[in-house]
Amino acid sequence: MLRGLLLCLLVVLCVVHAVRGDEPNAKPNVVFIIADDLTAEALSCYGNKQCQTPNIDRLAARGTRFTRAYTQYPVCGPSRAAIMSGMYPQAIGVTGNGGAARFTKNLGDRPSMAQHFKQHGYHTARVSKIYHMRVPGDITAGVDGPDHAASWTERFNCKAPEWMTAGEHALPTTQKVRKQPDQHYGLGFGTAFYIVKAHGDGAEQADARAADKAVELIETHRGGPFFLAVGFVRPHVPLVAPASFYEPYPPEKVTLPESVDHDWRDIPKAGMSLNSQRIGLAGRDDAKRKVIAAYYASVAFMDAQVGRVLDALDRHGLRDNTIVVFTSDHGYHLGEHDLWQKMSLHEQSARIPLIVAAPGLKPNTTAALAEQIDIYPTLAALAGLAVPEHCKGHNLAPVMAEPTKAVRDAAYCLKGKSHLLRTDRWAYIHHTDTVGELYDMHRDPGQFTNLYGDEAHRRVVLRLHRQLKGKLSIMQE
């Protein structure tokens, strides 16, 4: 315990020393960047051999890359509520996108992550989607969505044409959309794999406009301290990117994920999410490749905007006194197990990218288990702020200083009435008292063999179930 406290203190002192300069009371700036519907497996710094993300890669090259970080809920609204509150979805009372509007009331007088920095003298700014926004509806309408006003000194929305963008349009699935430019909601574009290979350079797109505003804010507030939260909406559908970003990803050259015969045989119904049969992709490898290619193009376009924000920090000499976070609200299936999008507790949907670069700390890669709610206390600690009592996450700063260190023995994720407990070796998914999934992540990282009903693993299931019950019992505190 004492060693851990001393290590944490050392990390904070390193950050403070790195940002002090000639000003004894200097505070580090924070740039928090979050992408929408981004799987870690689409990033080249996480091992993707096709999709190229040079700007996120360069942040990873100077920061700590967490290879086993997990969302609290594989849906936009609950995951973002968890990040910003530092609380589990059950505790903050947001367990679906519809519940996002209750965030402000449920949080009460407890400070959100951004609000905590605001209360300690930071200029806090939101650019585009940080709390939940309906994409594309709230983007085409240019509205806040269910935001938390107390978090921000100022906030900016990025109105954009989304599915109405001029260009080459395609819908390779059987999903239905209604093209009514005078309406923003209920048109089907928020779930359909609608593809737009856009004309022009993309300057009118939400992510380009978000980068524009972020660059402007960095210049305006470069005297600091500032907490800048930048939300990029890609690669959330519709998959819109300039045609030039599609060129490196011809569909015929896209590699489909590994598959096995009868993969669904041991996945219970409760463990299924959006699948190829439901959206007309079953047996259509060409259409699957077209979807994945468009997703990669959208990721690459988003990555270019990340680069513009990082360039602005460098241009104004702020790299050495700015903490930068890059993450996503949850993961995403791109055909693994013939599943698509989110709403799954399997690895591709539950695991997220998480990169944190802080002054004074060396680059690292760590396999330490982490959760989204760890971001709030980590940023507070790195900035030398006390961690509010309501935050239930763990400070990851000791891991950033010593990547072999662990601050938790399991990561947790919720989806509906199902729960994921991810330990070093096991992924245990509890659906009901008689229905579940168990995967040996050392021997079966692709999660192709469900060991839940295997008598030889009965004791493992019982042990993990007890561990899960213990986790749930303290979650509401």
Image: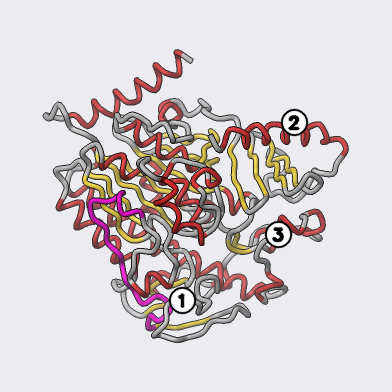
Instruction: Please indicate whether residue 218 sits to the left or right of residue 476 in the image.
Output: left
Q: Dot 2 surroundings within 10 Å: few (below 14), some, or many (20 or more)?
A: few
**Disc 2 residue type (three-letter):** Arg
Q: Residue at x 38, y 33 (%)?
A: 388
Outermost residue toward the right in this view:
455
Residue that mark 1 sits on: 185
Estimate the spatial distance between the alpha carbons at disc 1 and disc 3, rounded to whole Å: 26 Å
- Residue 227 numbered tag: none
Q: Is residue 4 magenta?
A: no
Q: Which residues are magenta?
A: 148-166
Q: Nearer the viewer, mark 1 or mark 2?
A: 1
Estimate the spatial distance between the alpha carbons at disc 3 and disc 2, rounded to whole Å: 25 Å
Where residue 10 appears, x then y in whole percent? Answer: 34, 20
> Is residue 48 something one can see in this rendering?
no
Q: Earlier in the sequence, mark 3 or mark 2?
A: 3
Where residue 260 appears, x then y in whole percent? Answer: 76, 58
Where residue 178 appears, x then y in whole percent? Answer: 51, 84
Where residue 428 appears, x then y in whole percent? Answer: 70, 41
Residue that mark 2 sits on: 463
Badge 1 element: loop
Q: Residue at x 73, y 36 (%)?
A: 465
Q: Is residue 338 above or below residue 46?
A: below
- Residue 272 numbered tag: 3
Is disc 3 in contact with disc 2, using a CB cutoff of under 8 Å? no
Q: Dot 3 surroundings within 10 Å: few (below 14), some, or many (20 or more)?
A: some
Badge 2 element: helix
> Is residue 279 something one can see in this rendering?
yes
